[in-house]
Amino acid sequence: MSEFLIFTGAFAAALLLFFGLKWSAKKFGTTNLEPARTAFAALPGFAPGDILVYLGSAIAHDAASGRIAVWEKASGARLLQRQDVGAWHSGTLLTVVLNRTTATPMVQLYAQAHDDKPFFKVGVLDKNDCNRWEAYLGKAFGANKSREIAIRVLGAN
């Protein structure tokens, strides 16, 4: 009987942790939407439409011009040109840590085609947004610059 209670308690704690993290990501992940929106609106010739924001990063798309701008809390907003991005990824980032793998929806921009680390990344709360951003990034920077797979290995020599 005590084993059953231990397993039931562990399962309840795991559920609570899962839904608690999901709730806190939605609540606190978008806290910088207004500062980002204001910074994007101040960029000359850029009318922010669709915006992805998570913690200290945001990315915006101007539907009329097809341009992309990024915002980071520390450095502010800037418009990106086609030549600024050597590769991009919109989808699941697989992170391998020792013997565990996690999958996180994310938009990442790389300065050079073969860079390992992105110069900009923003988390995606709804995985369905990745497909929409894939279309935006393909038009703005070129579909040929898409990385189908993004993998990060931590703890390797």
Image (cartoon, rainbow, N blue to C red):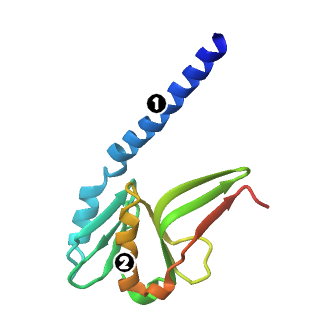
Q: Nearer the viewer, residue 113 or 127?
A: 127
Residue ID for mark 2: 135
Rendered image quadrant of residue 59: bottom left
Q: Is residue 20 above or below residue 134?
A: above
The residue at the far right in this view is: 157
Task: State the separation of the CA atoms marked 2 and 1.
Answer: 35 Å
Find numbered disc 2 in the image and state the secondary structure of the residue it sits on: helix
Rendered image quadrant of residue 153: bottom right
State which tag comes first along the sequence, 2 or 1: 1
**Residue at image point 23% right, 72% down:** 48
Amino acid type of the residue that numbered disc 1 sits on in the rendered structure: Leu
Rendering coords of residue 120 (x, y %): 47, 69
Amino acid type of the residue that numbered disc 2 sits on in the rendered structure: Ala
**Residue at image point 28% right, 83% down:** 66
Q: Is residue 3 above or below residue 62?
A: above
- In screen coordinates, is 55 left or right of 60? right
Q: Which mark is residue 16?
A: 1
**Residue at image point 40% right, 45% down:** 25
